[in-house]
């Protein structure tokens, strides 16, 4: 392993502080410790998933494979120990409260891509006793400090989206090919999607978005009226998971 968890978190901290050198892209520019970018604005990252385009690629798991590979997500042989950052589930399970009875039947009957919603009002952050999970003021990403996680699983219970996984077993022997520049986790630690904050720091899109060859996924800054995500949300009808809970998910689904 080329970088341990402490080293990774150090890099993450530099992202927050915005003091690292190196050129980031205009799209994913870094911000300072007060949550403002160089032009004085605050970012709010979001994901938009086009269910119509996604359903046309029956059986495609490119985004899942890419995410789990670059983040050293283990593959266990049973569902009890399953660790997942991004996965597919039925529409009815993902949107069981959906009251729109006239949606395209093909969409309703097709699996939906799910991941951490990086909520504006994240209940997982509120219940964490060690501040191991926190929301970055600079861009709204709900992060995890795996060094501070004590495995209490309060966050797992609090998350209404099932977006957190607990390592019941040592995950490292179950990683097919370890990626050296991303830390592995240990038994007793919770993990989840972080919107690929390490790639954003380098000016790159999340691995899942990059892997999707069909344009079904878009990522960007909601505060930028010219961003792709704002354009999609302006032009298309979208839904979010469990909006009545008031968590304000930042993953949108185009229907």
Image: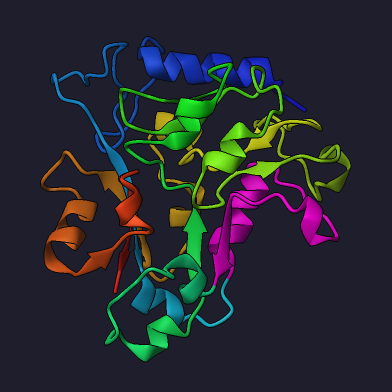
* Relative horizontal placement of residue 192, taking residue 169 as reference (left or right): left
Residue 41: image quadrant is top left
Q: Is residue 21 visible?
A: no
User: In the image, is residue 67 part of the stretch drawn in magenta?
Assistant: yes
Q: Is residue 84 visible?
A: yes
161, above or below 239, in the image: above
Outermost residue on the right side: it is 173
Q: Nearer the viewer, residue 89 or 199?
A: 89
* Relative horizontal placement of residue 114, taking residue 108 as reference (left or right): right
* Relative horizontal placement of residue 162, taking residue 53 as reference (left or right): right
Residue 179: image quadrant is top right
Q: Position of residue 222 (x, y in %)?
A: 21, 43
Q: Residue at x 81, y 41 (%)?
A: 168
Q: Nearer the viewer, residue 89 or 128?
A: 128
Q: Position of residue 31 (x, y in %)?
A: 29, 20
Q: What are the residue bounds of the magenta stretch? A: 61-89
Q: Residue at x 31, y 40 (%)?
A: 45
Q: Nearer the viewer, residue 31 or 211?
A: 31
216, above or below 29, in the image: below
User: In the image, is residue 206 part of the stretch drawn in magenta?
Assistant: no
134, above or below 44, in the image: above
The N terminus sits in image quarter = top right
């Amino acid at each position: 392993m080329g970088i341990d968890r402490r080293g990774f978190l150090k890099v993450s901290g530099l992202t927050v502080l915005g003091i690292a050198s190196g050129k980031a892209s205009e799209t994913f520019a870094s911000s300072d410790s007060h949550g403002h970018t160089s032009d004085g604005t605050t970012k709010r990252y979001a994901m938009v998933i086009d269910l119509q385009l996604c359903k046309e690629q029956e059986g495609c798991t490119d985004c899942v494979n890419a995410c789990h590979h670059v983040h050293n997500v283990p593959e266990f042989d049973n569902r009890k120990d399953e660790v997942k950052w991004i996965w597919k589930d039925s529409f009815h399970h993902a949107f069981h409260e959906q009251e729109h009875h006239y949606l395209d039947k093909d969409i309703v009957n097709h699996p939906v891509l799910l991941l951490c919603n990086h909520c504006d009002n994240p209940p997982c952050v509120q219940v964490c006793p060690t501040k191991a999970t926190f929301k970055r003021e600079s861009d709204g990403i709900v992060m995890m400090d795996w060094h501070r996680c004590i495995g209490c699983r309060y966050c797992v219970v609090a998350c209404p989206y099932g977006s957190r996984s607990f390592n019941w077993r040592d995950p490292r022997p179950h990683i097919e090919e370890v990626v050296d520049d991303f830390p592995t986790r240990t038994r007793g630690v919770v993990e989840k999607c972080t919107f690929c904050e390490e790639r954003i720091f380098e000016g790159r899109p999340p691995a899942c978005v990059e892997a999707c060859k069909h344009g079904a996924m878009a990522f960007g800054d909601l505060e930028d009226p010219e961003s792709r995500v704002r354009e999609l949300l302006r032009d298309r009808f979208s839904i979010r998971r469990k909006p009545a809970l008031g968590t304000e998910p930042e993953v949108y689904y185009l229907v």
